[in-house]
């Protein structure tokens, strides 16, 4: 959340420069010594802005942190901040699930920020993916090949399916 956690802070010994086109350096507030209480207060405020279902409960106000031009972008910004500084909280999990499952309102802003929040979540996942077993009847199948992202391709000969009731189980 650029305006919440990534606040402009002058580096020690540097002075603000106002030259056209020159921006002062930015540092995450959470990376600065002695700012733990401020970061905690800001994150508490972020969490208080949502209900247990991930719905924004505060009224929109363009000068407040919790409104970024679209409700989806707001949820994404909150998910990114919580994922970095309070990973695994129920709200963080709920927000990421909502963003990954949304199929409406495909604006550039909402789509881009949703993808950024989901990508942040995926970065923390194991490369090999979740462990799973594929069986045909009572026989475990061996993967034909790994297809990346923890996925595998399995081949099942049609002859092994003929005349036998089989189904896919999730």
Image (cartoon, rainbow, N blue to C red):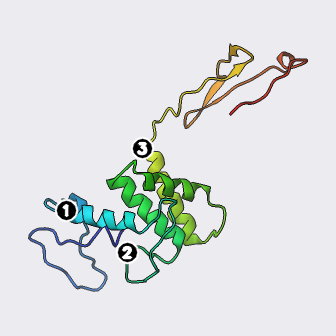
17 or 85, nearer to the observer: 85
Q: Quadrant of residue 14?
A: bottom left
Tags 3 and 2 touching, CB below 8 Å:
no
Q: Earlier in the sequence, mark 2 or mark 1?
A: 1
Q: Element at badge 2? A: loop
Residue at 34% over, 73% down: 3
Q: Quadrant of residue 36?
A: bottom left
Question: Which of pointers 3 and 2 indicates the residue nearer the eye?
Answer: 2
Q: How many marks?
A: 3
Q: Is residue 129 left or right of residue 123?
A: right
Residue 164 placed where, x, y %? Answer: 86, 18
In the rendering, which numbered label is found on residue 65? 2
Residue 155 placed where, x, y %? Answer: 74, 23
Q: Quick check: 119 above or below 11?
A: above
Residue 122 placed where, x, y %? Answer: 48, 46
Q: Element at badge 3? A: loop
What's the distance in space between the residues labelled 2 and 1, CA to CA?
A: 18 Å
In the rendering, which numbered label is found on residue 124? 3
Mark 3 closeness class: few <14, some 14–19, many ≥20 residues within 10 Å = few
37 or 144, nearer to the observer: 37
Question: Which of pointers 1 and 3 indicates the residue nearer the eye?
Answer: 1
The residue that disc 1 covers is 37
Q: Is residue 28 visible?
A: no
């Amino acid at each position: 959340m650029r305006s919440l956690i990534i606040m402009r802070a002058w580096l020690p010994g540097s002075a603000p420069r106002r030259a056209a086109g020159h921006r002062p350096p930015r540092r995450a507030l959470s990376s600065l010594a002695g700012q733990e209480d401020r970061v905690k207060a800001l994150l508490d405020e972020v969490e208080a802005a949502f209900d247990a279902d991930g719905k924004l409960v505060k009224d929109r106000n363009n000068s407040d942190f919790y409104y970024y031009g679209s409700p989806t972008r707001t949820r994404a910004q909150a998910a990114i901040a919580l994922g970095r500084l309070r990973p695994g909280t129920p709200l963080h999990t709920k927000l990421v699930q909502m963003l990954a499952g949304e199929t409406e309102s495909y604006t550039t802003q909402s789509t881009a920020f949703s993808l950024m929040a989901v990508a942040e979540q995926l970065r923390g996942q194991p490369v090999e993916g979740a462990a799973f077993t594929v069986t045909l009847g009572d026989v475990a199948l061996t993967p034909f090949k790994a297809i990346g992202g923890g996925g595998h391709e399995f081949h099942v000969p049609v002859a092994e399916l003929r005349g036998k009731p089989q189904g896919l189980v999730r």
